[in-house]
């Protein structure tokens, strides 16, 4: 099992996404990084992506992990951007989280990937593969 630290994931993917974004994101990288961490950890209002991934793996098997990791990076990379330039909103996150809870962790990952990929521009940056993220 490959384990990756948050900082390695951030610099290997999210920092590149941030820097490739519109010039209006310049200067706000610390806030972007905080949002990325919040996405993975969760908050009192919502489960984080790590917990959602674990639930999906329990329900759908280990093969779901790589899909969830890829999907999480694509969703989070967009959601963490400033409101004026992002495509994925907090409402999307709430809707998708509620759907996952309603299905007891069985996320229709393929359908979600198709939906997200239709919303977002083609990825310019390759996602980082890992089995476990250490925050």
Image: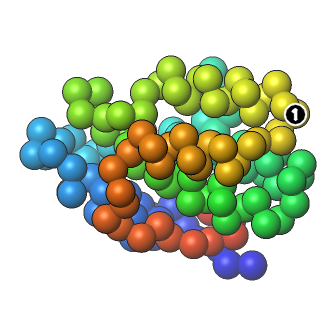
Q: Nearer the viewer, residue 126 or 19?
A: 126
Do we see residue 40 in this rendering? no
Mark 1 residue crowding within 10 angstroms, few (<14) / some (14–19) / many (20+): few
Pinpoint residue 63: horizontal percent, then vertical percent: 79, 66
Left or right placement of residue 24 versus residue 45 in this view: left
Pinpoint residue 86: horizontal percent, then vertical percent: 31, 35
Instruction: Determine whether 34 is above or below 43 in the image.
Output: below
Element at label 1: loop
Instruction: Determine whether 103 is above or below 25 in the image.
Output: above
Left or right placement of residue 80 versus residue 134 in this view: left
Measuring 89% from the left and 48% from the top, which residue is drawn there? Answer: 59
Q: Nearer the viewer, residue 127 or 44?
A: 127
Do we see residue 120 in this rendering? yes
Image quarter where the C terminus lies is: bottom right
Measuring 47% from the left and 25% from the top, which residue is drawn there? Answer: 90
Figure disc tally: 1
- The residue under label 1 is 104
Image quarter where the N terminus lies is: bottom right
Measuring 87% from the left and 60% from the top, which residue is drawn there? Answer: 61
Pinpoint residue 81: horizontal percent, then vertical percent: 31, 39
Pinpoint residue 14: horizontal percent, then vertical percent: 37, 58
Measuring 55% from the left and 67% from the top, which residue is drawn there? Answer: 5
């Amino acid at each position: 099992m490959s384990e990756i630290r948050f900082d390695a994931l951030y610099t290997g993917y999210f920092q590149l996404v941030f820097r490739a974004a519109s010039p209006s994101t310049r200067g706000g990288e610390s806030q972007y990084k905080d949002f990325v961490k919040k996405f993975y950890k969760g908050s009192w209002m919502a489960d984080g992506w790590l917990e959602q991934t674990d639930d999906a793996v329990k329900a759908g098997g280990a093969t779901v992990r790589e899909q969830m990791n890829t999907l999480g990076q694509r969703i989070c990379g967009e959601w963490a951007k400033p409101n004026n330039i992002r495509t994925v909103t907090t409402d999307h996150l709430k809707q998708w989280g509620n759907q996952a809870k309603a299905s007891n962790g069985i996320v229709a990952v393929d359908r979600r990937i198709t939906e997200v990929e239709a919303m977002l521009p083609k990825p310019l940056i390759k996602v980082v593969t890992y089995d476990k993220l250490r925050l």
